[in-house]
Amino acid sequence: MTDTKPAAREATRTSELRHRLRKHVPAAVLFVLGLVAWEGLIRAFDVESFVLPAPSEIGSRLVDQWSVIMSAAGNTMIEVIGGLTAGVVLGVTVALISVRWEAAREGILPFAIATNAMPIIALAPIANNMFPVTSPVSKMTVVAIVVFFPVMINTVRGLTEVGTGELELMRSFAATPRELFTKVRIPSALPYFFSALKVASTLSIIAAIVAEYFGGPQDVLGQYIIAKANLFVFPDAWAAILVASAIGIAFYGIILGAERLVMSWHVSLRATEAG
Amino acid sequence: MSDSPVVRARNLGKTFGKGSDRVEALRGIDLDIESGEFVSLIGPSGCGKSTLLRLIGDLVPASSGELTVNGKSPQQARLDRDYGIVFQKATLLDWRTVTKNVELPLEIMDEEARSERAASMLDLVQLSDFAKHYPWQLSGGMQQRVAIARALAFEPSLLLMDEPFGALDEMTRELMQQEVLRLWQQTHTTVVFVTHSIPEAVFLSTRVIVMSARPGRITDRIETQLPYPRTVDTRESAAYYDKITEVRESLRRGDRQ
Amino acid sequence: MLSFIVVTFVLIAIWEGYKLIWLQMGWIRPVRPDNTTMPHVWDMIIELFRPVRRGGDLLILDLAARSFFTLREAFLGFVIGGIFGFALSVLFVRSTLLERSFMPYVVASQTIPIIAIAPMVVVWGGRLDFPQWLSVAVISAYLTFFPVAINTLRGLKSPDPTALELMRSYAAKPREVLWKLQVPSALPYIFTALKVSATASVIGALIGELPAGFGDGLGRALLTFSQQFGARSVKLYATVIVTALVGVIFVTVVTLVERKTLAAGSRDFEVELMTGRATG
């Protein structure tokens, strides 16, 4: 309440550590318990592996199939990274354009919102046939479209939702539109951009795998999973699913890290201090 | 030029909206504010005191009448960076440190020696120890002091303050009032100060402009005539209480008209 | 609405313009402008009014039946997922321990490529003697529950602390706090989530139909027409258009219900939820 105490940034390291432990321990405990229970139930009831394989079986299949799955995962990653990059660049570009020209925004934003209501998955077979079937471009296109909308809509939102106080302040400085843009609009859009990126990162892998389902080269995660599932070799399929999911989580983690690096000032990242 | 008032308004009016939504926020404002004055605008909510401040700051255009700032149109005055402004909210940019926030107007004005300037401003508001902190690490009163430092960083001739201490607790508020008076005397800036607190207006100002609502207009002008520097003793003096009573009664009269 | 129509026509103009220019110039990159890869927009529409196969129904009637079928799965998935997501968020708001234990897995669940587990879900459904469309609805629910859980949790946590203290001063039971304070404050959040979920449920139904191995829904039609692409590309495009419409219609219905329920709409939340800001 008084004027002298800044927020407790100098909170001791140990209490921060304790806070983090308290936050993450329950999930870790659940992970171990869940794994043990899963393994135990499968063994106790002798569940067939095409219904649900035991974690140990999935693990051993993962080791066994490691090189095949990794090669497939590598090809899928190429599609994901290509599509994600294209989608983000395109999304940000269109956002910048539509913020610069209000007329463009009037037209584009409602359309983007409506388009987002469409099951974009339906575009996968079209993209697959527009580009040579062996090229990863068709999958990248689907990923890019899926990524484009959240990135664009969120960036527009971040760029336009600047408080009247900030606008009036910059006006009182007689700042140029360009200065308003670089000094206020872009920094305030960063949190929005990053949350879009987090969603986009997990969406992109799912989109790539769905696109793979509609045909193309065999050496990709989607085709691997389908082939194994069609042969009822479900433990192998599960191993590949695990890898796909791990890639998604890794992407998410990388973006989380980048966010912390770029936006250390932001409210959402101050949680540990408050504890 | 030096003799002409810093702010000069003649028959100034402002209307918002059209048709049935039309609201007359200000009517027939005549006001001169001389260089070096500390003028408070006080009145009930809806009396247009903030609007008047915004007209002076060229944040909204006037609907009728004349208004000059330093003998120029408000727009020209804004482009010449004649005034600094402080809102009720500190409106610091979250991603900039305290120093960088103070440097913001200097960057925009292509000022050289920004960091020296910012450092001396932070010294002035006694926040040098917090130069590298981010806004969220500061208390409300400290944030507001940064906002004041930012507004004064480019040495404007006019300081516009829109209920700058409205969100602060009473103790902090009194400290900040003292602080503003000190800055005013050190920098010889002209101040226009919007408030809804009678004691605040009396304590700070050379002159209190009493306003009334529907339509917003000036109903009274009261010279406070209390000697500077004003201190805790001022707050306890009989003259101070008399002035508070005078302003309160004037507000009540204005309301009844 | 008007701008939407304008943009639609602009897109059609770009599509046809691309065809025209690329044909003139003889360009084939990035996309061939021929009538198989990029059929004329009017051909797609005309195709809707031709029989699916010799002597069969008109394509539009066939697709309408399929849309109805897919919408039924999607709607069921939407309801199951919505209830499950809501229940989860109520549990999480009651117990921080539960939230901390399960939340990371709720988020991680969405990184699992649903299309990959769809065949397994169908197998599980088969074991339990589920009809296949019910298994598809479960797959759809898997995508639907997530936005609802995340956004409802945020909504339930949104009331001001003083409002909670007020309820406490009335000695309100947890259930009363939930229904009289938390749920009403969460409504705008929930509707935002439901709009996202509406699209997600259609996507889930489409994906679920792919491995399910039955031919009644839109998903199967997409797969079949895409495999017969060469000759029937117009059919694929027509099907994609209908599928897109199904998604838009579902979202529109949810939006209308929202307008009826909430006096003041929750437009502010619309974008936020749509892009899943909640995950952040």
Image (spheres, rainbow, N blue to C red):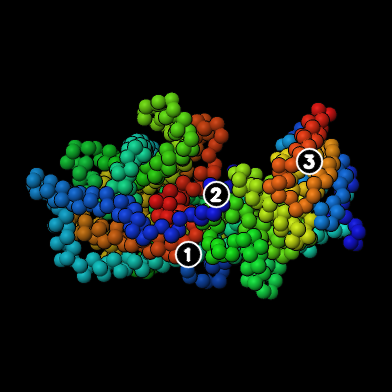
- Position of residue A111 relative to residue A90, above or below, is above
User: Mark 3 near mark 1, Cβ–Cβ under 8 Å?
Assistant: no
The chain to which mark 3 is attached is: B
Report x, y in % for residue C128. 18, 38
The C terminus of chain B - image quarter: top right
Are both tags, 3 and 1, on one chain?
no
Q: Which residue: 49% across, 48% down? A: C272
Name the mark nearer the viewer: 1 or 2.
Answer: 2
Asked if residue B92 shows in the view, the reply is yes
Q: Which mark is residue A262?
A: 1
Residue C14 appears in which quarter of the rendering?
A: bottom right
Looking at the rendered structure, the kind of residue marked 2 is Thr
B54 left or right of B145?
right
What amino acid type should be assigned to the residue bearing mark 1?
Answer: Val
Q: x%, y% of residue A191?
A: 50, 57
The image quadrant that residue A68 belongs to is: bottom left
Task: Residue under label 2, please give it.
Answer: A2
The span from disc 1 to disc 2 (Cα, nearest Å) is 31 Å
